Image: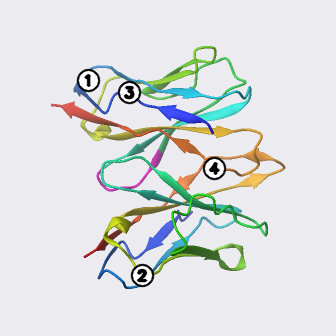
Amino acid sequence: AQTVTQSQPEMSVQEAETVTLSCTYDTSESDYYLFWYKQPPSRQMILVIRQEAYKQQNATENRFSVNFQKAAKSFSLKISDSQLGDAAMYFCAYRSAWELGNQFYFGTGTSLTVIP
Amino acid sequence: GAGVSQSPSNKVTEKGKDVELRCDPISGHTALYWYRQSLGQGLEFLIYFQGNSAPDKSGLPSDRFSAERTGGSVSTLTIQRTQQEDSAVYLCASSYLAGGFTDTQYFGPGTRLTVL
């Protein structure tokens, strides 16, 4: 089974600064999808950004961008101009492109604190 | 449109009682997932439904856990003879699948189950 590793249980960033959250994964597949989800204290999991493995260009969504290194099986999330509302748990997730409708694999999460 | 909804938002029960948790997926989404999130932990896959196919029950931790999905829409997760270790947040997610193409999972707000 695929595994997703988030090696930083906790991170903190000063408001308006930039922070990078790490994620690595293990797979033998060549085509897959990668996701970053945000879970604020409200518990609602919110999609932050998504990357298709066959695309070389890194995905970006406003202040959020990823550094996708396929050979290294690394998928880090960069948050620029951090805001207080960015404080949350962040989960990295993997999904095979070939297993129709099969499960997502989630990391254990990184708790991000934003310091005013 | 409306997102994924779950009810109840919180449930407190006594050890040994049965509980039912409900999930209403986004209209038109053919895939539905249940996850369990214990305090401070990542997401543990429980069960997956896709259209009329047999569900993937590989994540259910014991035979006390079961789920059904009626009419390809609403799903109910049932936990029989609850134990204290069942205390967790139960998250439901739905996604749209067509022609083998997988789409993003959208999560509900979860049900926090506390077993006394």
At label 1, counting other C-alpha atoms closer than 10 Å, the crowd grade (few under 14, some 14-19, many 20 or more) is some
The x and y percentages for residue A3 are 55, 35
What kind of colouring is applied to the model shown? rainbow
Q: Residue furthest front?
A: B62
The x and y percentages for residue B112 are 34, 67
Image position of A113 (left or right of A60): left
Given residues B21 and A88, the one toward you in this image is B21
Q: Earlier in the sequence, mark 1 or mark 4?
A: 1
**CB atoms of marks 3 and 1 within 8 Å:** no
Amino acid type indicated by mark 2: Arg
**CB atoms of marks 2 and 1 within 8 Å:** no
**CB atoms of marks 3 and 2 within 8 Å:** no
SS for tag 2? loop
Q: Which residue lies under the disc numbered 1?
A: A16
- Disc 3 and disc 1 on one polypeptide chain: yes
At label 3, counting other C-alpha atoms closer than 10 Å, the crowd grade (few under 14, some 14-19, many 20 or more) is some
Given residues B105 and B17, the one toward you in this image is B17
Q: Residue at x 67, y 80 (%)?
A: B70
Alpha carbons under labels 3 and 2: distance apart: 36 Å
Q: Which residue lies under the disc numbered 3?
A: A7
Q: Which mark is residue A103?
A: 4
The x and y percentages for residue A27 are 65, 29
Q: Which mark is residue B55?
A: none
User: What secondary structure predominates along the stretch shown in magenta?
Assistant: loop
Amino acid type indicated by mark 1: Ala
Please report, as a chain letter, where disc 4 is located. A
Q: Earlier in the sequence, mark 3 or mark 4?
A: 3
Q: Earlier in the sequence, mark 3 or mark 1?
A: 3
